[in-house]
Image (tube, grey):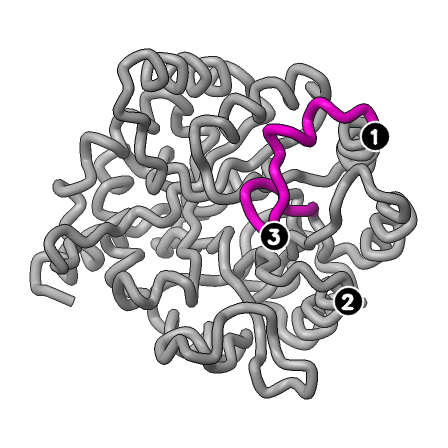
Amino acid sequence: MNRRAFLGLIASLTPRDVGGASTPIPIIDTHIHLFDPRRPQGVPWPDKDDKVLYQPALPGRFRRVTQGLGIVGAIEVECSPWLEDNQWVLDVASRDTIVVGTVGNLEPGLPGFRKNLERFHHNPLFRGIRCGNLWGRNLAEDVSKPDFVSDLQALADGGLTLDTANQDAALISATVRLTDKVPTLRVVIDHLPHLDPPSEPAARKNLQADLRELGGRPQVYVKLSEVLRRVGGQGHYDASFYRSRLDELWGTFGEGRLMYGSDWPNSDPWGTYPQVLSVIREYVSNQGSAATEKFLWKNSLQAYRWVRRAENQPGPTHIPAALR
């Protein structure tokens, strides 16, 4: 971590006044992954040849890499297509209060979706599911299927959230159509800063129009995750390098709909956790303290209705006894 990035991180830790006391703004990381390659069944991802990622990613390790950074809670987003890994994650999460919610893997439109949704939703940590360009699925095609849309209406009726994964122009367009069909569904667009706009002018114009349309829909949220890039093999840890793209997304979705997500540990090849956080905090701190607080935790509470499990976590004062 270079000196400028470190100073940006320290500067972003500006205190806020709460009841006359000066305290730092707490952070909910809305995008981490949990897995353990040591399990007898192994893991479907990451690949065992990945020397950076192929190691246990569990809440205890997450606590260690974020120590002293103000992270008080995290939402796990599923990185496995195996049905029973939904339960594995919920079991792991139940043992550590740092996890305030999980986004699971269920495939809408298939037999058994409603039954499995009811099964996992019995656990209050289960806050939604993930769909998009992953595991051989294609939301752009699925959104035209009545059973798929009906299952997502059931997701919305249950007060749960849909994360869309691995953005491209077709997925953004499909998200517009989906929210036309299920307007009560809260949708979280993951990793939008990493989307490369099409080079063809007409396609780029269509993408911009779709983003503006989604920007006007209050039930659609965006994670400023996967921000870091390498150019010529060099990492960049200065917010000014990313400012134009982040300004565009901030202007489109506004301070009430953007959230912080690290993508840990999938972010490790791009930079350390402090480097990931410092870039986005340096940028967001310039938007003002009220906007910073929305970005760092308040918007995620609106998007996910996550569960407060510890005294240092913000949000509703009631902490469910079963999840303390």
Q: Residue at x 26, y 64 (%)?
A: 271
Marks 2, 1: nearer the viewer: 1
Residue at the image point whose x is 19% and y is 30% from the top: 244
The residue at which mark 2 appears reads as 84
Q: Measured from the top left, where is residue 153 in percent x and y?
A: 79, 28
Quarter of the N terminus within the rendering: bottom left
Which residue is under mark 3? 135
Q: CA distance from mark 3 to mark 2?
A: 15 Å
Q: Which residues are magenta?
A: 128-146
What is the x, y in percent for residue 310? 61, 65
Answer whether residue 138 is magenta in the image: yes
Amino acid type shown at disc 1: Asp
Q: Nearer the viewer, residue 48 or 13?
A: 48
Q: Which residue is mark 1?
A: 147
Secondary structure of the residue carrying tag 2 is loop
Q: Is residue 322 magenta?
A: no
